[in-house]
Amino acid sequence: MDEDLNKNLFFQTIKFKFPKIFQLIESKCYTLCIPQFSSLYGMNVSQKVVESHVFIESKYYQSEYETLCDDSSYFVENGFIVDKNNKSKKVKILFDEICYNKDYKSYRLLCIEAPLVGGTGIKPSISHEEFDHFQGIVKPQRPTFEQSIQFLLDSPASINSIVMRKADKLIEDFQNTWKIIKGRETDLKESLEILHEKVLNDLVCANAEYKQLQSNHKQMLNLSMILESYILGRLYDKIYKELLNQYELENMQLYEKTIKLSKHSIEDLGIRASFEPHLSKAIEIVNSFEKEKTPIDKLLSIVQASKEIEESIRARSILEGTEEEDILTITGDDALPITAYLLIQARPKSLQTDLIYCSHFIISSISNSSLGYHLVNFTAAIDYIKRLYQEFVEKQLEDNTISTSTTSPTSSTTNLTSSLSFSDISISDNNSNNNNNNNNFVDNNSLRNNLNDINNNSSSSSTIRKNSNPIQPNLNKFNQYNSTPNLHYQSTISSPLKPIIGHTENAHKYNTLTSNSNAPNNRSTLTSNYVYTKAPTVIDLNDDESGLGEFIGKLKDIKEDVVVGSYYVPSK
């Protein structure tokens, strides 16, 4: 039974890899010699080899031909193609076929026993009939590591199993030799590429069917990705888990960002609201992202999620009878924020490690495939998440600043009545160093007694609000007392406060506060060198809700000096 030339690998290679040559054969009605399937094992189908099998009939002699590359001459005699320069070299013609071009002009296809040039002479391990049942190498599907084991180790006695046992030894040596250094993952990748290429070459050389597919780029890419998944799956504990430890801090920071961004609406994240009904199943798919073992597995989860969104959109448009021009489409501007949204909602805890893993440890050439596109999109989505978080933080700080300046009507009054602020001070008292073990705390009862003494010597009214459970403020951390600008200063020690001129004649009468430079921790303590021109009104503010309002009301009516005592423990 004659071979089907349409399935012949040599013929397919010419049609799809060298289409210009095939178009020339059709248009010029040249003769094409096609070696039979069994003779192609180990053959490298290059352009020169192809041109050596294209015959141009001689203008002067019947049954004589020149090759397209114009380096050999042949003639046909008794069913053989004979080399004109070496008549001992001849190849049998098995059969011929007549084909027609689009202008209905005929050209010939000659099926020959062996290649005219480029053949190896090695017979394949499988017959043509067996090869017909070989469906090629299927593109890997998730989970790729399990699929690679099933594909490469189909039986212990198979050729693949023999090759992979040798590969396992190389992988083990690699695991014991190499160490991952943070920031130098590229060095490790280069060594992985060498390992991958060696094992791939061993597989191709050992399998006749792989050898036949060597000129088919897509098939070889599929085989490369399957082998890559096998190697990375074996090295998962070595590579991925070490990356987890090295990027632990970055993973935690990025995880916190996704947590906070997940509380924002879909519009806040830059996605059209019309996409929201189509994203739920895609989120479920991306939830398995961090569980995948290989970089290709992780990318395939994003690819699958993207396809799920498209399927959801298509299904709804059919259900609702949407016009084709009105169907929702994912544009380039939509793809990035949608990928970021899926990651934000899935909230993988090791996203930075996944980024390093996918961007540095994919060995196969995927730049021109959908995987390459989704890798670029995944990388950009993580940058988008970081940038989006920073924008929200800056906006929140800006909003808080505006809110503080517009919603505080007492800010000017407070600044006026508190223009002199004493930081970390304590009130002098005979019992200031008694039972309190921490000298940085103020005795609130002593403070109250001193303030009462001041008010008892004045004719102005005073108000002291009682606090049944006073909180002792820590002077190392918080400012405690603010006084009005009418406080008269009289001291011989160095101080950042400027004295107010005048009003000294009655200074001795209200001699209650002093400044002591020998206070603990170099803190200043107000003593008798601080005097008032008048007995000040003393207001003690507690933490109750009405304290601030009453304080502001009193300030409007009080004409003389004011001492304000307050204490608080701000939130950490």
Image: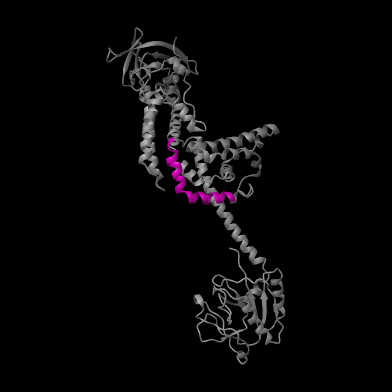
Q: Quadrant of the C terminus?
A: bottom right
Viewer-proximal residue, 65 or 263?
263
Q: What is the x, y in percent for residue 278?
A: 64, 38
**Relative height, residue 271 to residue 398 (above, below):** above
Q: What is the x, y in percent for residue 90?
A: 31, 12
Q: Which residue is most to the bottom? A: 505
**Relative height, residue 475 to residue 147 (above, below):** below
Chief SS of the magenta region: helix
Identify the colour scheme used. one colour
Q: What is the x, y in percent for residue 327?
A: 65, 36
Residue 396 located left or right of residue 89:
right
Q: Which residue is most to the front? A: 435
Question: Could you say which quadrant of the image residue 185 lies in?
Answer: top left
**Relative height, residue 463 to residue 172 (above, below):** below
Q: Is residue 204 visible?
A: yes
Residue 244 among magenta residues: yes
Q: What is the x, y in percent for residue 396?
A: 60, 58
Q: Quadrant of the N terminus?
A: top left
Question: Could you say which quadrant of the image residue 525 lies in?
Answer: bottom right
Viewer-proximal residue, 384 or 20?
384
Residue 390 among magenta residues: no
Q: Which residue is most to the top? A: 78
Region rendered in magenta: 234-259
Question: Could you say which quadrant of the image residue 227 lies in?
Answer: top left
Q: Is residue 46 visible?
A: no
Viewer-proximal residue, 214 or 541?
541
Viewer-proximal residue, 211 or 453?
453
